[in-house]
Amino acid sequence: MPAAEVPVSVELVRGLLGEQHPDLADLPVEILTNGWDNLVCRLGEELLVRLPRRVIAAELIAHEQRWLPELAGRLPLPVPAPLRVGRPTTRYPWSWSVVPFFPGRIVALSAPGDPWAAAATLGGFLDALHIPAPPEAPVNPLRGIPLAGRASGVLNGLAHVDPTDRAAALRIWEVAVAAPVWEGPPLWLHGDLHPANILVDQGRISAVIDFGDITSGDPATDLSVAWMLFTAEQRAALRQAYGRADDGTWQRARGWALALSLVFLTHSEDNPLMRGIGERALRLVLDS
């Protein structure tokens, strides 16, 4: 995990709240996770505080602060639109957010009780999210792009795949890259939709979190989640609920699932959760 570029701690969170949001300063603060990009602290019973650890994460939080409030009202699942925004100070250089706390566990650790219903729920969510984005929407050089832009990483990643699977994976990749490219307008995308960014509560998908990679482009990037969670029959339920994935988009989505599974597998030596997501996704891609 990359080292923090600035010191982040519970003490820092308490200090920033006291300076900028004193009405929240008396709530208990405890670390929920200290991840690659953000320190996330529980703030009382209903809130979280997200502080970037790195300059690249500060840019991602700014995207959430700018765009999630506009999108949240039209989405059928809760998303962490910021409730408060913190300003940079002499003790901390970036903006930070207070966001709602959503109960539940990530899908990677708690499978939905009814995967067909979960697939339909996720398909409906993506249908609502994937609308044309304005020209000033974020553009990510690695997400939402034509699949050919991921070729180098995929070919390097395949070198680490078991030889018995490599040839099949390469054939899948070649079919996906040969599919027609996205010719529609750039659509809003979550950009990092995988089983650690989807919550389940009481057996049902209940929220979608971590929109730091929100971007615009080819919807196949987000639809790749179908191969990270679901069997072929369950994927059909997601596709039906989504309602507008033609065969080319579906082929590219499978290619994106392969590309992202290889990323998870080759960059998760210290993160067994993400490695497990990669292993499951690769198996579902190969078995479909």
Image: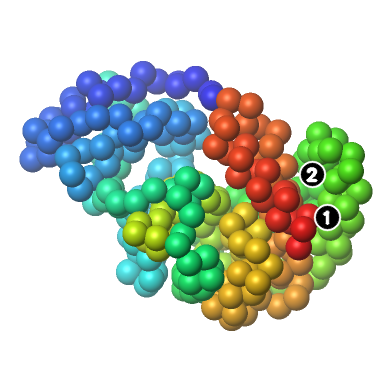
Q: Are marks 2 and 1 in contact (CB under 8 Å)?
A: yes
Q: Which residue is mark 1?
A: 173
Whether residue 217 is visible here, answered yes or no, is no
Q: Is residue 261 left or right of residue 215?
A: right
140 is higher (above) or lower (below) than 112: above
Residue that appears at 81% across and 47% down: 151
Q: Nearer the viewer, residue 65 or 115?
A: 115
Q: Which residue is mark 2?
A: 154
Residue that appears at 49% across and 20% down: 3
Three-letter residue code for mark 2: Val
Whether residue 189 is visible here, answered yes or no, is yes
Residue 50 lies, in percent from the top left, at: 33, 38
Residue 190 lies, in percent from the top left, at: 51, 57
Element class at badge 1? helix
Residue that appears at 71% across and 78% down: 246
**Quarter of the figure with the N terminus:** top right
Q: Is residue 50 left or right of residue 178?
A: left
